[in-house]
Amino acid sequence: MDFQLSDEHRLIRDLARDFARREIAPIAAECDRESRFPMGVWDKLREIGLANLSISTAHGGLGLGVVENVAVTEALGWGCAGIQGAMGIQSIMADITHVAGTDAQRRAIAGRLLEGQWGGYALTEPGAGSDVGAIRTRAVRDGDRYVIDGSKVWISNAPLAHFFVVFAKTDPAAGNKGISAFLVERDAPGVRVGAPLGKLGQRAAPAAEVFLDGVSVPASDRLGAEGEGFLIAMKVFDRSRPMIGALAVGLMQRALDEAVSYAKERHTFGRPIIEHQAIGHKLAEMAMKTHAARLLVSEAAALTDAGTPDPMKAAFAKLFAGDAAMWVATEAVQVFGGMGYSTEYPVEKLFRDAKVLQIYEGTSEIQKTIIARELARR
Ligand SMILES: Cc1cc2nc3c(=O)[nH]c(=O)nc-3n(C[C@H](O)[C@H](O)[C@H](O)COP(=O)(O)OP(=O)(O)OC[C@H]3O[C@@H](n4cnc5c(N)ncnc54)[C@H](O)[C@@H]3O)c2cc1C
């Protein structure tokens, strides 16, 4: 499968690499310390045309595919997984209307994202994360509107969001087939966003609870047909899982770069530590896993762009890259020795940032379940 970037797209990727080095990496530690998303970075990214890449050209975007998006995500994620993690949710907002929206909904959401508005993807609840079918938020039809009641947790960007895509049960007896998706305005009566949640890593990406108390939305703000919500969420995963994989690859590449450069400079027993075989071999495995993850991510992305998305390949990409990122970041800390444990050096942040890559967008265990199910089915 060919997933090489064209010359033009390579220029876009290189622009993103340069942006990450100049605008993101220098402020990453500070934003992490202050749990602050740097809105100026997003504004600059929009100015140079590197935001909202997947919005179609018909709706004012660049209309780039998942292959180009993962290349840019990796490049920006090298600078900071938290900052890019927050910005990546914006492309999920475009993706969901791409997967399920009417032309009017696509146009409206594209316009709002291009104007600089933020969205939040509200699926998880206190009692339902991996088990999506167990969500309890209810949407009850009332004439040409729905009334939504429930609560969501861990909603990335909720503190910044102008609107949400909320998943709710329209037919509680129908299990996964009873879920529908709705566009919900943040300022609609009955919507309340909680305080930002304290987090281990990726602290520049704010997340919060979202409470919905008798929120009335027009039926025209339902995405897809009634009962299609679960299917929509699964289709979005085909696009978003390679993107999370790409975020992991960016983090791994950063950990590798930092570790190689430290290992060349740090001397013990009269030589740079890179010349001790134990450290050299560690770096070799880090480089290999980073490359392998990049290939898996690129393949899953290319399959989606070709119109043949493969949930097993998307799960390979998310699972391998998420687990490898945690491993690579842990080894980077080891290469730095005591300094790896210090907040003065960048690798302890990479270690903390990596952990959630094994949790959100479907945990590593759930990716294995998907792969096993596909093996049984094929
Ligand atoms: C920083 C952050 C940001 C997030 N952003 C969003 C967001 O924007 N929108 C959103 O909707 N959600 C978001 N989430 C939620 C995230 O997707 C869920 O936390 C995740 O899917 C796991 O669900 P859970 O926390 O309920 O864990 P649980 O489902 O309770 O799982 C607990 C443990 O049991 C394992 N497990 C569960 N079921 C099985 C099974 N069948 N087989 C084997 N093992 C199993 C899990 O792998 C895990 O190890 C975010 C989470 C975090 C931490």
Image (cartoon, grey):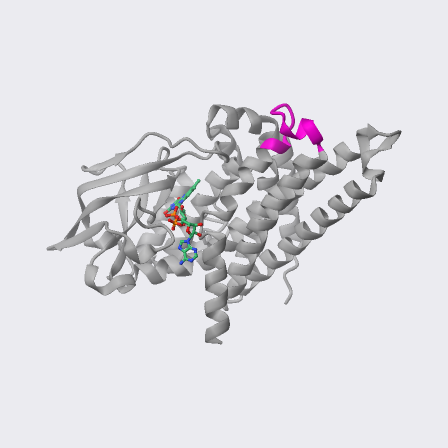
Measured from the top left, where is residue 151 in percent x and y?
Answer: 26, 43
Measured from the top left, where is residue 354 in percent x and y?
Answer: 55, 41
Q: Look at the picture and state if 169 lies above or below 164.
A: below
Q: Was residue 189 drawn as part of the magenta stretch in this picture?
A: no
Q: Was residue 341 drawn as part of the magenta stretch in this picture?
A: yes
Q: Residue furthest bottom?
A: 378
- Residue 320 visible in image: yes
Q: Look at the picture and state if 301 lies above or below 120.
A: below
Locate residue 143: give its quadrant: bottom left
Q: Residue furthest left?
A: 143
- For the residue pair 54 and 318, the one nearer the viewer reads as 318
- For the residue pair 227 and 104, the one nearer the viewer reads as 227
Measured from the top left, where is residue 180 in percent x and y?
Answer: 26, 57
- For the residue pair 210 and 351, the one nearer the viewer reads as 351
Locate residue 366 relative to residue 252 in the image: left or right.
Answer: left
- At horizontal 36% and vertical 43% (from top left) the residue drawn is 120
Locate residue 79 relative to residue 368 in the image: left or right.
Answer: right
Measured from the top left, where is residue 284 in percent x and y?
Answer: 76, 48
Locate residue 110 relative to residue 152 in the image: left or right.
Answer: right
Q: Which residues are magenta?
A: 336-348
- At horizontal 63% and vertical 25% (from top left) the residue drawn is 342
- Residue 309 visible in image: no
- At horizontal 29% and vertical 39% (from top left) the residue drawn is 210
Q: Quadrant of the N terminus?
A: bottom right
Q: Residue furthest right?
A: 270
Q: Look at the picture and state if 40 lies above or below 375.
A: above
